Structures are given as C-alpha cells and as structure tokens.
Amino acid sequence: MCAKKAGADEVYACELSKTMYELACEVVAANGMEGSIKILHMKSLEMEVPKDIPHRVSLVVTETVDAGLFGEGIIESLIHAWHHLLLPPQRGENEFREQSATGRVIPAGATVFGMAFECLEIRRHHRLCVSDVGSLSMAAAGELRSPVSCSSEPDDSMEPYTTERLSRLPGGYKPLTEPFTALNIDFNNVEELEGLSSRQVQQIRLPVIQEGELDALAVWFQLHLDEESSLSTGPQEDTCWEQAIYPVHGTRAFALKPHDELVVEVSCRDAYLRLCAVAVVRDGHEIRLDLQHAKTPISNANPEAELCSALACLQTDQTQTKDFCMLECSEMALLNNQDYHQRFCSALAKLISRLKVKCENRQQGSGVPPDFTDPANSTDCSDLLYVLDVSEGFSLLSLIAASQGHVKAYSSVEKNKQQEVLRRLAYSNNIPEQHLEFWLNNSEDEQGMLQRPSREKLWSAIILDCVETCGLIRQKLMEKASLARCLLEEGGRVFPERIVVHGMLVESDVLLLESAVQGQEPTLGFNIAPFINQFTVPVHVFLDFSTLQCRRLSESVELFVLDLMDANANYTNREVKVQATSSGRITAIPFWYHIFLDQEISVSTLSQNSHWKQAAVVLQQPLEVRAGDWVCLAVKLHKSTISISASVDNVPGPMEC
C-alpha cells in the first residue's frame, strides 16, 4: 500500500499464511486498492515469471528478518528473487541505465553488532549454577545444557540462538566489551548473498572493559533501508525486535578481567548467524573456553597461579563434553531455584513423617514394626509410601520424595537422557534403585497417567504441575486435581493443596501498544486496526512484572482461590473490590500466584528467582480512576482460563462487589 501510494505502476504481494493472506485482501480492499495490488497466496520462492507475475520487477521490499537477522530465510528468498523475479542490479556508479531497467532491494543491507555481557537472568536459564537442590547433591548430574548452541558449527538438534529484550531483563546486564561489528551484508549483491554460507569463520579479538562473569553474547543489527534511511534493533531502541542471545555453556563460570581479550568466532555456515566465545587471552596466554584444550603459551612468561587455576577449572574429560543432557531454558531455571525445591522438600518431609507415624501405629499390633531408619532395608514394597510426580518436563521432586526414606517415587520424566540423569543422582544420593521408577514407562499413554500405583495401593502424595511457565493456569488442572484426590490413601495429599491468584491495577502504555493497533496514526493513516485487532488476545503472557513499564494504581489484592484438596471450596466466578491508590487509566491487571504446598509452606510465581513469568489481562477500554475510587473486578475461571473485567464502583468499602 505504501508503494502504491508512492506512485508505483504495478504492485504485487505474496503471503503464505492463509489467514494473513485473507486479512491482507480485506485490508487492501478497505483502503480502496483492491484493483491495483495483486496479492498471491504463496511463498516468494514459488513465484515464477510470467506464471504469477507478468515480468520482472524493479523493486523487492521485504521484512523477513528476525532478531538474528537471517533466521526467517531472507538470504534464500533474496537469492531466488535476484535470479527469478528482479531486474538485474545496477553494477556501478558509471553504469547509466534507466531507473526502471535495474532492480534493487529494500532493505539494501545490514550491519550486525555484538557485545559480551554478564547477566544472572541469562545464566540461570542456560547452565546449572547450584551444587545442591533440595536435599540432593547435584555432583553426579553431568553436564546439563539449554537447547541453544554455543558453537560456530551447525547443529540441527539445537537452536542457533535465543532472543531477549535486554532492556527488560530482570536484574539488568553488565557489558564486558564495547559493541563490535560482527558482519556486513549487501542485499543488492547476489554474489555476496550466495557466498555468505561459504565465508571463512571470522575470529575477532575484543578488549574486555570491566570485570564480570561471561554469560553470553548479544547481537543486534542496523538495517540500511537505502543510502539515507536506517533503523536499529539495538538494546536501547524501541522496536518490535528483541536481541539475539548466544549463551555461554559450561559446568563452571569464567570471570573476565580488564586487559583480557575475548576471542569470538562469527560464521554463517547454514545461513544462520552464529557467534561463539572460544577463548580468552590473558597475560599472553590463550585459555580455551570450549573446554577441550589449552594452547601453548604465546610468550615465555611463567603463568600466574590464577591462570593455572583457571586452566584447571576449564579442563574436563573430552568425552564428557560430548555427552550432555539437554533441558529447556525454563527447566534449567527451575533447577536453579533452590528456594522452590527446599520448600517442596520441607512440605514432603512433613507429610511423609506424619504418614510414617501413622503406618507405624497401624502395624504395632503385628509385632513387627517397619524399619524406617535404613531405606536400603525397605524392600517390602507393601510397606512403602507411594509418591507420584506428574510435573511437566524435567523434575527432581520424585527424587526429593524418595530421599526421605521408605518412599517409592514415580517420575513422569520421559526423555531417556533425562531419566539417566535422575538414575545417576539417585545412586549418588544413596537412594535405592528400586525406589525410583518412571511412570510413563508403565502407562500406555499420558491420559492414563493418573491411576493407582497397583491394584492394592493408593498414592501417599501426587504432585501436580499447576502453572505454565508463561504465567497461565495449566489446562484441565481442576479435572486432574479431582481425579488425583480419588487416588490418595487416607491422609495423603495433592501438592499443591491450594493456589491463590493475586493481581494489581496498573497503567501501562506498553501493554496497550503490544496488544492491539491503537488507531490509524501508527499505520500512516491506512485503515488496518479493525482488521488486525480481530486477532487481539485479551491475556498477555510471558511478562516480567519487575521490569514492566507501568504505573501501579493499587496495592496487590487476592483475586481468586483454587483449592485442589477440597472441591466444595471452589467457585467459577467472584467479584472483588479494589481501591485505587493513584489516579490514572487502568489498562491492565497483571496477575500471579501464591502456590500453597500445605497450610504453612508456599512458593510465589512473582519471586525474583522464579522460573515462572507473569500474565496480565489487558482491558479493551482503559478505565479512568481517581485515587480513592473503588474498582469492581469480575473474575471468572472457565476451563482453567482466567478472565477479568473492571468497572468503577460508587459504593465505598473493602468488600466483594
């Protein structure tokens, strides 16, 4: 539409998604251009001349770039466009062709920048940072990695990078080097595009500017639209792009110091941009960060004791680096959450101790009291307490339960390598092999996960995974809790027993702008908002409330309670009154959870070291309030989905509406 408005004679567009193709047709028609723009429902790689368009074109405009620049396939699509859709490019300044006789691309090219930095938030999502979790030593875990590659070599089993908005990282970040130029690319040079994947791996030496732990490399780019206009996706810019993050893996951290040089490799061998920190040069000696070898010292100076210590830390058995277990980033963050596991350990210990006493009292009449002191002697499975952990993904809670003694624990971990890690940890923590089993190995499908451990036995505890990492209640949670209660022995518990939903009134322009198109001004006067806003989702997920740009208009308030142990205590809707503490526009209600493992022990999804994010209901129409006003929130729970509407209540008083 911009091209047509600028005076282009013929305009073509292509879109693979059927939904977005149909939306584009509606938008073009609503702006009176349906007769002058031809929209094709296909990939550009499938377009042919003259089958789909009558002749080659003079301009291709594309925005197929992601945070890592090449991740959406812009290289492949532009190579195809130059060979099959575009007029030949202008070859040089002295070549005088008519403007219409040459082809060009917008954007014309890009410059990629990088920076090494320290960040606890990145660290805890990509490598194990703790030596003990709950009651367990992690020494035997082996190498655990997130699914993000840290190599310049292509690896189909791993992602080339992850993405984050650096400006919103909890706890911030510390730059360890100045920003550096990693790569330049000319989109109007087809030979350069075709040669990108065969470029030699480039090594760049970066002076370290301040002391800090090397956690990752960040990448952003400047998109050169033409000779005059450009836009940046840098950390300080407000754009729709995040930054690409290349985490540093390893079982031990490495601290950089001023006067060090960090050696970074840059490559594009599979048309993905890859950056990898491979070495540190300190006092003339190169320390390899890939944990495989240390090079011969460059100078004859004796290495300092500190350097020897660093080398010793970085050396490890070569076979061990190849044999690692992959965990999702959220699973790694959960593993690093010591407070979460310690609270589960305490709650499980209380329950198991109580059930042991009950079992002991029950068996006093038999004259043969059970031996709870030595779990290795508890081979009579009829006397054991049974615990089922049906957490999603990798979880240590089954092992923590088994470590209490006289417990046979069942884990829902499915992946073979992750099961191997749990077996190693069980062995190293003196948990008998027969006291850990993998439940999904015994059940035919996931639907049959919640059933009795055997015909004669019931569960002493069932651990449910209640909240998704994104900040929403898991689907069918209450149905699972209802079934789980039926499978408990007398005195057994569902963990957690109760979830309390908390929320707050906020004013946040960011949430408004990221949830819907606000009028025609952002779209240069084109009528787009009514069409694209059909796809608005009322609940924003994966928020971090600690870094969300917002004004808090109230204190936190209890919105809803889900009781997993008492079905009669639950309800489907509730109205709550909240008093505004400041004047403003209520645009959203962020919410989070206090998860009660028992009456006294709880964990919060809002805590700083939580692996959970928060969510927020974004109001369709912002609500003006003054300080002191009472706001009525109607909270509903339907199929584990929370919805909230708000209205100003003229009746004062802290009560339900």
Image (tube, grey):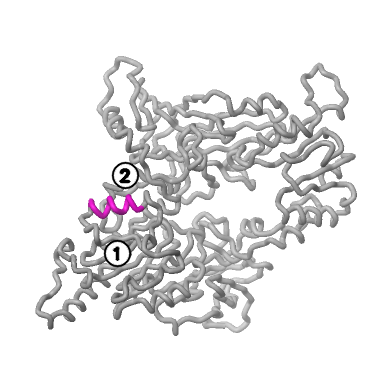
- The C terminus lies in which quarter of the figure? bottom right
At 84% from the left and 37% from the top, the residue drawn is: 50
* Residue type marked 2: Gly
The answer to which of 177 and 515 lies nearer the viewer is 515
486 and 342: which is toward the camera: 486
Residue 370 in view, yes or no: yes
Task: Find out whether the residues at labels 1 and 2 contact each other: C-beta distance under 8 Å.
Answer: no
- Label 1 vs 2, first from the N-terminus: 2
- Could you tell me which secondary element the residue under label 2 belongs to? loop
Any part of residue 229 in sight: no
Q: Is residue 34 left or right of residue 298?
A: right
Is 69 situated left or right of 557 in this image?
right
For the residue marked with disc 1, what is the amino acid? Ala
Query: As drawn, is 333 to the left or to the right of 245?
Result: left
Name the residue: 43% across, 77% down: 482
Residue 336 in the image: x percent, y percent?
36, 52
Magenta-highlighted residues: 419-428
Kindly indicate the quadrant of the structure image that contains residue 567.
bottom left
Q: Is residue 135 above or below residue 81?
A: below
Q: Main secondary structure of the magenta part?
A: helix
Q: Mark 2 points at which residue?
A: 142
**Which secondary structure, mark 1?**
strand
Q: Where is residue 520 in the image (x, y as percent from the top left)?
A: 78, 55
Residue under pointer 1: 409
Q: Which of 117 and 97 is in front in this view?
A: 97
**What is the quadrant of residue 222 in the picture?**
top right
Report whether 301 appears left or right of 478.
Answer: left
Residue 625 image position (x, y, % from top left): 63, 71
